[in-house]
Structures are given as structure tokens and as C-alpha cells.
Amino acid sequence: MTRHTLVKEYRPETDCGYTFNVSFGDPPIHDRVSIWEHYEYYGGNEYAYRATIERSALPQLAEALADEAGLPPDERPANPERLVVAALRQLLESGQLTTRPLKAGYAKVKAMLDAAGIAYREDPWVWVDFSE
């Protein structure tokens, strides 16, 4: 599996580590693309909000994100994985894709997938430390 962390920051107002990620699974076992936000609170709890897309939709995903990001066709990488990463970076840099408030990036990704007609599965994940 190849993972790209596009945003990594500490959020002092919530005492939380935050990342915005995209990963590409290795076929045939992990034949998926995932885009997600991960929150790690320094009291022990973790939360992730993930949209998972079938790899067969990767070309459509790459073009839809590149169009949303406004990447000129002649500047788009031919490799769809690289195009997804480039488009997400551009969307983040331009402010079209925001990482605040809570779950904002996840909500925007789902809206873009819905608008493009790309099927996805919502895969939220939670780990809570009950040791205290």
C-alpha cells in the first residue's frame, strides 16, 4: 500500500495531531483507494473519517479531482495515482479543500465524489482509551 500524507499538523486548541491522507492499495488483495482525515488526541483517543473507492474507479476519480482542482490537461500526470495526489495538493493549497473545522475535508471529498457519480464506502474508525 502506498500512502501520501498531504497535511500533517498539531492543533493546540484541541491537543490533537491531524493528518489528511490518500492511499492506494496493492491489487488484488487491497484493491482500493482511500482518502481520509485522522485525528489523534493526546489523551489517547483517535478518530478517522475515510472514503474508500474501488481501484477500478481510479481513472474517473483522478480526472474528476483534476477538473475540480482546475489542473490544465497538458500539466496532468499520466499516472492516475500521481494525478490524484497532485489534484488533492492543488485543492488543499487553493483552499477549495479545507481541513477545518472537524471533518471538513472528509465532507468536501464526499461531495466531490457524489458530484462526479463515483461510488464510495464510508469507513469511519474510532479508538478510545478507557484505561483512565
Image: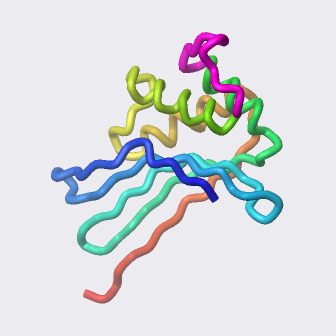
Picture coordinates of residue 27, whole percent (x, y): 79, 57
Whether residue 96 appears in magenta in the rendering, the answer is no
Q: Is residue 62 above or below residue 76?
A: below
Q: Is residue 41 above or below residue 56?
A: below
Picture coordinates of residue 104, whole percent (x, y): 42, 38
Q: Give the extent of the magenta segment.
A: 68-79
The residue under the point 68% across, 24% down is 64
85 left or right of 56 in image:
left
Picture coordinates of residue 41, whole percent (x, y): 29, 64
70 left or right of 28 in image:
left
124 left or right of 5 in image:
right
The residue under the point 46% across, 50% down is 37
Q: Quadrant of the N terminus?
A: bottom right
Q: Is residue 17 above or below residue 7?
A: below
Whether residue 75 appears in magenta in the rendering, the answer is yes
The residue under the point 39% across, 32% down is 98
**Residue 117 falls in image quadrant:** top right
The residue under the point 79% across, 65% down is 29
Given residues 46 and 73, the one toward you in this image is: 73
